[in-house]
Image (spheres, rainbow, N blue to C red):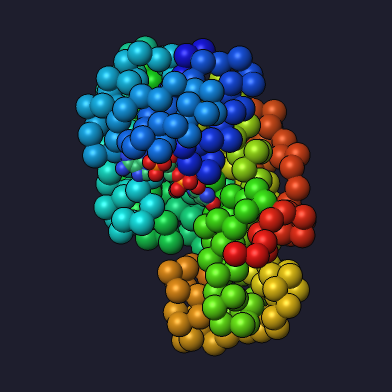
Amino acid sequence: MKLLVTGASGFIGSALVADLLRSGHEVRGVVRSDASSVRVSELGATPVAGGLEDPASLVTAANRVDGVVHLAFRHGSPLAEAAASDREAIEAIGESLAGSERPLVITSGTLVLPAGPVGTEADRADPDAPAGARSEGERAALALAGRGVRSAVVRLAPSVHDRVPRGFVGALIDAARRSGFSDYIGSGEQRWPAVHRQDAARLFRRALESAPAGAVLHGVGESGVTLRAIAERIGAHLEVPASAVPAEDAEEHFGWIAGLVGTDAPATSERTQSLLDWKPTHPGLLKDLDTGDFFAAR
Ligand SMILES: NC(=O)c1ccc[n+]([C@@H]2O[C@H](COP(=O)([O-])OP(=O)(O)OC[C@H]3O[C@@H](n4cnc5c(N)ncnc54)[C@H](OP(=O)(O)O)[C@@H]3O)[C@@H](O)[C@H]2O)c1
């Protein structure tokens, strides 16, 4: 298939582009800078100029392909703004694909589900959940299934990992380096799903190739790694003590992830695995922490 990937220059997008090319697809990647254009070209895909702030550019690009994976997200912007921009992009791409039965796979996260119970694909996104703002993107994508788009939502585990510090785990490592303590909150039993980046990439490809219209999929390789286990592993590698901080000191210690660290948010991918015959095969988060380059000198 001739495919379009937004966010092709990013952490997950670059792995997806490589996976799609290996599987014989032709790939175009949406880019908004010369640096991203070079990155996408080096991966072996064709850069196409565009951006989330310019939905018309996404429509033009989507008009010329057989399917789209939408991974770009305005990290660094306030979540509500980034989520609104995400929804606009999904609606624009959807307009281009409407009536064609071409696939559109969009990205969400398991943190759109309420904390506590083990989240499944059958659970609806909740606007009040930790990443609930992204539920509007999910709704926009699922509505397209009734308009002749083979749309699917991939909810990723909050820890997508592959050898280097990123996102949630990267922020925990930064906090431990800053403070000299690898901390957790309370008992540290809060559970965080994780998935290896290469498994996530393969899931996006499987979804593109064969997910039924309106599918909600979970990119979850491990349903809940405890915060304490992660903190202890980081502490051992950095040779700093792992210890509990009171919830009221979380902001000072953890910085931008303070609001999420104390959340117990397990999720499964059982339905996804059987629906798409997708099995996570890459190392889990703790093994990756032990064998990757998370703690290389900086
Ligand atoms: N990594 C995780 O642990 C994780 C966990 C859960 C969900 N997710 C979700 O998975 C998706 C991909 O994440 P990632 O880790 O690969 O992110 P990333 O490495 O930060 O990459 C983000 C991508 O989006 C592009 N982008 C950002 N703002 C844009 C804009 N205004 N217009 C066009 N493109 C723009 C970036 O392009 P440039 O190269 O030009 O910056 C880059 O290609 C996101 O939706 C993210 O929220 C990630």
Ligand 1 location (quadrant): top left
Q: Is residue 164 left or right of residue 239?
A: left
The quarter of the displayed image where residue 117 is located: bottom right
Residue at the (60%, 68%) spot, across then down: 173
- Is the residue 56 above or below the residue 237 in the image? above
105 or 234, nearer to the observer: 234
* Direction from residue 220 to residue 133 in the image, left or right: left
Residue under the image location 67 percent in, 61 percent down: 296
Residue at 52% x, 57% y is 167
On the rendered image, what quadrant is the C terminus found in? bottom right
In this view, 63 is above or below 116: above
Query: Residue 187, position in %: x, y?
Result: 66, 80
The image shows residue 26 at horizontal and vertical percentages of 51, 15
Whether residue 121 is visible, yes or no, is no
Residue under the point 44% across and 32% down: 38
Percent from the top left, x then y, of residue 183?
Answer: 61, 79
Q: Quadrant of residue 57?
A: top left
Task: Judge left or right: residue 250 versus residue 74.
Answer: right
Quadrant of the rendered image containing residue 243: bottom right
Using the rendered image of the protein, determine whether residue 43 is visible from the camera's viewpoint.
yes
Q: Is residue 241 above or below residue 152?
A: below
Image label count = 0
Q: Position of residue 218 (x, y in %)?
A: 57, 42
**Which of 120 and 44 lies nearest the eye of the viewer?**
44
